[in-house]
Image (cartoon, helix red, strand yellow):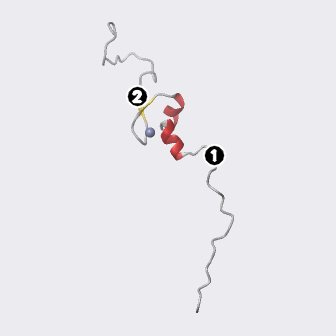
Amino acid sequence: MPGLEPDAAPEGEPDGVRRTVRCGLCGRPLTGAGSRRTGLGPACDAKLHPPGPDIPVRRREPEQDTLPGL
Ligand SMILES: [Zn+2]
């Protein structure tokens, strides 16, 4: 495209507009505001923070096997 400087990064940009924030996990540049805030991409954020409580709550105490034949 004419009129666009490919790699020029002028210093006069407003703060936070052009700053590249990268995912803390995979290093990909983040685009979403939420991703920038958390510092993680959506995929990695989902990995670290699963949406639902998928892990069953352990209410049982660990079963202790009585040693057989003692
Ligand atoms: Zn990531």
Tag 2 residue: 20
Identify the residue at horizontal 63%, vertical 71% (top origin): 62
For the residues carrying marks 1 and 2, which lies nearer the camera in this image? 1
Identify the residue at horizontal 42%, vertical 22% (top origin): 18
Q: Is mark 2 on a helix, strand or loop?
A: loop
The quadrant the N terminus occupies is top left
- Extreme residue toward the bottom, this view: 70
Q: In this view, does 57 lie to the left or right of 31?
A: right
What amino acid type should be assigned to the residue bearing mark 1? Gly
Number of residues whose C-alpha sits closer than 10 Å to that of mark 1, classed few (under 14), some (14–19) or many (20 or more): few
Indicate which disc residue 17 carries: none
What is the x, y in percent for residue 13?
41, 17
Whether 25 is drawn above or below 66: the answer is above
Sequence-earlier tag: 1 or 2: 2
What is the x, y in percent for residue 20?
40, 28
Judge by depth and name the residue closer to the eye, 52 or 16.
Answer: 52
What amino acid type should be assigned to the residue bearing mark 2? Thr
Identify the residue at horizontal 34%, vertical 19% (top origin): 9
What is the x, y in percent for residue 48?
52, 46
What is the x, y in percent for residue 61?
66, 70
Tag 1 residue: 52
Identify the residue at horizontal 35%, vertical 16% (top origin): 10
Q: What element carries label 1?
A: loop
Number of residues whose C-alpha sits closer than 10 Å to that of mark 2, classed few (under 14), some (14–19) or many (20 or more): few
Q: Do the residues labelled 1 and 2 touch (CB within 8 Å)?
A: no
